[in-house]
Image (cartoon, coloured by chain):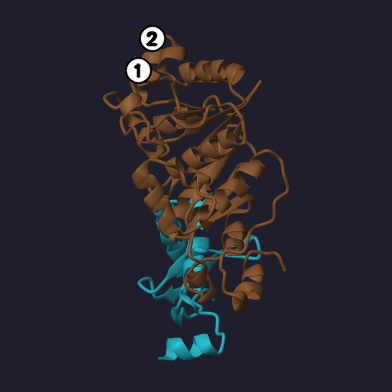
């Protein structure tokens, strides 16, 4: 029996979909059988981030409303054998799938897949409630900005109220140089405020944009810093104890950075 | 310039400190579910009660929630214009 992990954030644009795509691709690259569920109905995006936009025939609404069998709606990735996508509907709205249907869907998916990752829509309305309905665990994505952290705090409260205890934090788009200059909140600042466990930190990296342009998640890019960050997150999800990496190659900064990221 | 100097000398007012402090305050309100309306009527009631004993500057009165070391406090800054003379004897 697999597990269902929902990726949330509250605020839009902080990298939920990118995070979902990278974690899913990373897990599949390690040989796991994974399905990514795009729960952002009406604003389908996970398909383009994964480069699978041309292969969609049926979607999540077709599958839950009985328009097709679930198996027909699930798309297999071009490169990675274990990677699958259940795309969102683009023409419907967030109420097209009910919380009961979502729970049923997740139950069915986790019988067949080791990991079911649900990409949650932004906001705290019905779409959010649906997306978390069948989840066993949750990830909260934030960026080091006041607005994003505030919304993350709200989401953490709502997740806990929905009995999804112990959400894990992913800090996205951290700019190490700005943190060092005192112009961006550090990892410790955010952990201090949000008081939840850290799953990983992804540095701001041009390579993410380049990879997303091509529809190939950066996690498979061996050379990039962000790819390494996502691979570390994937290992932590699997239960491995991976220390936070150094996010700057400048050797003179390493001591400071180690302190900043809590290694020293 | 002052900002630069205080940064060089390690004073606590980098922009991230400002961000963190603002965030901390906004979360105190968010988490406590205290609405601006509620604070407003609290303020009005306080004015009513305190005015019985002293003359206060209603315009300058400030009531806020504050958090320090995981404790939340209601902080009121109430400037007094003048004390009322005792008239009850």
Q: Are marks 2 and 1 in contact (CB under 8 Å)?
A: yes
Label 1 element class: loop
Q: Can you say whether A197 is above or below A181 in the image?
A: above
**Label 1 Cα crowd, 10 Å radius (few <14 / some 14-19 / many 20+):** many
Q: Quadrant of residue A114?
A: top right
Residue A58: mark: 1
Rendered position, A183 above or below A33: below
Mark 2 secondary-structure assignment: loop
Q: Residue at x 57, y 64 (%)?
A: A247
Whether residue A143 is visible, yes or no, is: yes
Q: Chain coloured brown: which letter?
A: A
**A251 displayed left or right of A132:** right
* In this picture, residue B61 sits left or right of residue A57: right
- Residue at label 2? A68
Colour that chain B carries in the picture: cyan
Q: CA distance from mark 2 to mark 1?
A: 7 Å
Q: Quadrant of the N terminus of chain B?
A: bottom left
Q: Which mark is residue A180?
A: none
Total numbered labels: 2
Residue A63 sits in quarter: top left
């Amino acid at each position: 029996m697999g597990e269902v992990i929902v990726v949330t954030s509250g605020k839009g644009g902080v990298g939920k979909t990118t995070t979902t795509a990278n974690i899913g691709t990373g897990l599949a690259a390690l040989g796991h059988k994974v399905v990514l569920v795009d729960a952002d109905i009406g604003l389908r995006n996970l398909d383009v981030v994964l480069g699978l936009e041309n292969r969609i025939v049926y979607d999540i609404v077709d599958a839950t409303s009985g328009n097709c069998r679930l198996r027909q709606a699930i798309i297999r990735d071009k490169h990675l054998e274990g990677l699958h996508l259940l795309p969102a509907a683009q023409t419907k709205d967030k109420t097209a799938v009910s919380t009961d249907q979502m729970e049923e869907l997740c139950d069915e998916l986790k019988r067949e897949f080791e990991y079911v990752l649900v990409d949650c829509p932004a906001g705290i309305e019905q779409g959010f409630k649906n997306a978390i309905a069948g989840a066993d665990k949750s990830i909260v994505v934030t960026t080091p900005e006041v607005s994003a952290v505030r919304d993350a705090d709200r989401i953490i409260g709502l997740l806990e109220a929905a009995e999804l205890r112990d959400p894990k934090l992913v800090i996205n788009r951290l700019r190490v140089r700005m943190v060092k200059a005192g112009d961006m909140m550090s990892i410790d600042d955010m952990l201090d405020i949000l008081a939840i466990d850290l799953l990983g930190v992804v540095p701001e990296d041009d390579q993410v944009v380049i990879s997303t342009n091509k529809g190939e998640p950066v996690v498979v890019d061996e050379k990039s810093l962000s790819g390494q960050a996502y691979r570390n997150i994937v290992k932590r999800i699997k239960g491995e104890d991976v220390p936070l990496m150094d996010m700057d190659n400048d050797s003179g900064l390493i001591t400071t950075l180690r302190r900043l990221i809590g290694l020293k | 310039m002052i900002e630069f100097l205080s940064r060089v000398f390690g004073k606590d007012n980098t922009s991230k400190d400002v961000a963190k402090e603002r965030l901390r305050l906004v979360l105190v309100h968010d988490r406590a579910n205290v609405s601006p309306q509620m604070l407003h009527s609290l303020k009005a009631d306080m004015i009513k009660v305190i005015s019985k004993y002293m003359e206060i500057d209603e315009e300058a009165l400030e009531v806020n929630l504050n958090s320090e070391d995981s404790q939340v406090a209601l902080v009121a800054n109430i400037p007094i214009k003048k004390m009322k003379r005792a008239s009850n004897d």
